[in-house]
Amino acid sequence: MLGNVKMVIVNGCSYILELDQILCGAEVYMESIELNEIRGWVFKKRVHGKIIFIDLRTSKGIVQCVFRKNKVSDETWNLAEKVTQESSVILKGVWKDEPRAPGGREFHVKDLTIVHMAESPYPLGKKSHSPEVLMEKRHLAVRGMRYQAIFKVRHEILRAGREFFIENGWYEVSPPIIVATACEGGATLFKMKYFDIDAFLTQSSQLYLEIMIFSLEKVWCLAPSFRAEKSRTRRHLCEFWHLEAEAAWMNLDGLMELEENLVSHICSCVADNCQRELEVLNRDIDALRKVKPPFERITYDECINRLRALGKNINWGDDIGGDEEWLLTKDLEKPIFITGYPLHLKAFYVKEDPNQPGMGLTVDLLAPEGYGEIATGGEREDNLEKLVQRIKAEGFDPSLYDWYLDLRRYGSVPHSGFGIGIDRLTWWICGLEHIRDALPFPRLARTMKFV
């Protein structure tokens, strides 16, 4: 006791009481203490005689709430018996330490208000469902605790990525989504009408970021990109979130250093700030802590030789696809860079290696544990004549890229950039089976329902 106040413990909760309150008796005083209030949705309910447990879902996670028949009114008890899964409720009561409860404490309820009684049965009330059902009911499936954990990790990935660029002096810019030209291959463009002219959904913001380096030097953006690929693999999306960066004066080595520092920073932040979520996902936190620079760097030639040694039938000049990437990375603990692809495998803007004609100054970043490519980038062709030749070789009309060619006419400089798929990064960091679970509303080549 200190002066006229004293700490008392009632039902496992600590309270500071004035002297006159102590004289009245702590139990009597507890009747007049203002109760805590929590709001959420009924995730699960268990009835055990004169005790009802409700697992309440909130944005912070699951709260175990306890109703004792002799501690609540008959009306409150009857409502607790009737409330259905996914009903939205407001509860008033007190907190009590309980090591067996989620978070180490539980909520002892004194009063229950049902905001909305959900229809019963709940369509996703069973313990497990097929991927088809979870896509069909995506608008309900995202309420699940596994999805909540994934989306919290994704949030931390985005926060950490933005933090990295801000702290290192990069400028965030906002490129357009509706564009007039291709950035990657013309076969994967989503075509649309922009009033009375043909336009497309962007495949990448790279070309617009290149414009901005002449003003701000180091720029980045986070925006959706679209690819009309009919691939139905576990890693392909038709719409994905793209974290892209471009910098003047940066060469390939500087670019790889930038990428490994960014990815390492993101993994470290997730490991530090999302431990509970990673536990829900059964993800090895120590595996993320091992993602530290430097990352291994191998050339395309070395990659082909390594794949052959692993038993893969592949020829020089072939592209490195998902099966090859899985074989290369399944036993790795850290990402790996593959540098110097043949030019015919890359887009028109890739700069040719002056020391190796026909080879590009380009790099792909592959995630470990079999996840494969998560980022691609390289040096950009800064020579006007060579760039025009490459555009023509791709079958495009150089006049459509006149604005892009102006960048090489007026103050051209060596520059580099890369793009990393946020969805693939989330897919790997969370240790997911399929990329569709890495974002709330996936756009796949085969979609069961378009939510």
Image (cartoon, rainbow, N blue to C red):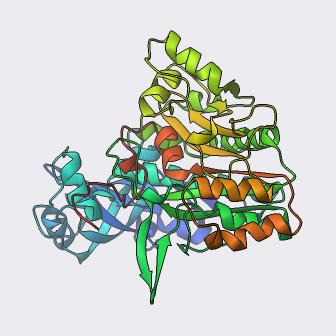
Up-down relation of residue 141 to residue 303 (above or below)? below
Q: Is residue 288 visible?
A: yes
Q: Is residue 243 visible?
A: no
Please report the residue visible at 35 percent of the width from the left and 66 percent of the height from the top: 40
List x then y, in percent, for residue 410: 87, 69
Q: Nearer the viewer, residue 270 or 116?
A: 270
Residue situated furthest left in the rendering: 121
Q: Position of residue 234 (x, y in %)?
A: 36, 41
Q: Picture quarter containing residue 378?
A: top right
Measuring from the top left, give residue 251's x and y in whole percent.
Answer: 82, 44
Front one among 349 and 62: 349
Classify the position of the N terminus by image quarter: bottom right
Residue at image coords 69%, 35%: 359
The image quarter in which residue 391 lies: bottom right
Q: In the picture shown, does residue 326 fall above or below 77?
A: above
Q: How many marks?
A: 0
Residue lying furthest bottom: 195
Position of residue 421 in the picture relative to residue 237 (left or right): right
207, 373: nearer the viewer: 207
Q: Quadrant of the C terminus?
A: bottom left
Q: Is residue 368 above or below residue 418?
A: above
Q: Position of residue 364 (x, y in %)?
A: 62, 38
Q: What residue is shown at x 52% (from left), y 64% (from top)?
A: 224
Q: Quadrant of residue 413?
A: bottom right
Vertical arrangement, residue 287 with respect to residue 7, above or below: above
